[in-house]
Amino acid sequence: MSISIALTKGRLEKQTVSMLEQCGYGVEALKNKGRALVFPDSVYDISYFLVKSNDCITYVEHGVADIGVVGKDTLIEGGQDYYELLDLEIGKCKFIVASLPENEIFNKVGHIKIGTKYPTVAKNYFLSKGMDVEIIKIDGSVELAPILGLCDGIVDIMETGTTLKENGLVVLDTVCDISARVIVNKASYKLKRKEIMKVITDLERMVKENASNN
Ligand code: PRP
């Protein structure tokens, strides 16, 4: 039976494609993709498509994709109707709380404002600290928001830390670690178990091999 795999485009894309290649999958079309969005595997009966992270969950939840590769950040923020089967241990980064050094958000009395692309993560974090927080949803360049005075601090992803540093922000706390995960549609897991488990087992082997090489 043929299967479809939704890959998150952007930061995770190159690493995911190279893991599939290491496993012997025919991903040449994905490596020379131009503006195309759907790609057949040249070895197996698989079609890949490239989507934004939130859409990756949507395609998997609706069964249009049998498998998805997406960051844990996106999974924590939204979506729940899928099986999460594997940590690929790529795209490693962290959810952090940051602010300008002078803002001292943890010492502020009363209401604080937090800018973030991840309102659920941010809200849960500050609620767990018993803090009175107003979440301001921002779609990108979150580091700008405290600099311009829109908020006191941010909850965002940090990979190298360069963006924070270059904008004069400091990390105040780590919320949790993040990496790319393989998710599977619940019905597909039953109906196409053999095909899906082959992909999972191949990738799992590569995760172990990469870990032992590091
Ligand atoms: C992410 C994140 C930070 C940056 C962190 O943004 O929101 O801004 O990367 O990376 P670093 O620690 O390696 O500097 P992204 O580049 O995805 O763009 P966006 O802000 O427009 O969403």
Image (cartoon, grey):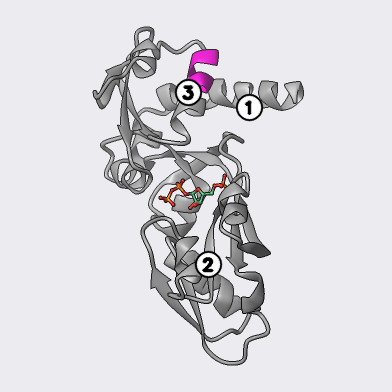
Which stretch did the figure color magenta? 18-23
Horizontally, residue 53 falls left or right of residue 125, namely left
Percent position (x, y) of residue 89?
A: 61, 36
Q: Nearer the viewer, mark 1 or mark 3?
A: 1
Q: Amino acid at mark 1?
A: Val
- Asked if the residue under mark 1 is in contact with the one under mark 2, i.e. CB atoms within 8 Å, the reply is no
Residue 162 x/y as whole percent: 60, 47
Front-most of residues 58 and 174:
174
Looking at the magenta stretch, what is its main secondary structure?
helix
Query: In the visual, does 214 lie left or right of 191?
Result: right
Question: Real-space Cα distance between discs 2 and 1?
Answer: 32 Å
The amino acid type found where label 3 is placed reads Val
**Residue 124, label in figure:** none
- Residue occupied by mark 3: 199
Does residue 124 sit above or below 22 in this rendering?
below
Name the residue: 60% across, 41% down. Answer: 92
Q: Which residue is mark 1?
A: 207
Does residue 42 appear in the picture of this structure?
yes
In the image, residue 155 above or below residue 25: below
Read off the residue under disc 2. Answer: 154
Locate residue 64: give its quadrant: top left
Q: Secondary structure at mark 3?
A: helix
Q: CA distance from mark 1 to mark 3?
A: 12 Å
Question: In the structure shown, which secondary structural element does the residue marked by tag 1 occupy?
Answer: helix
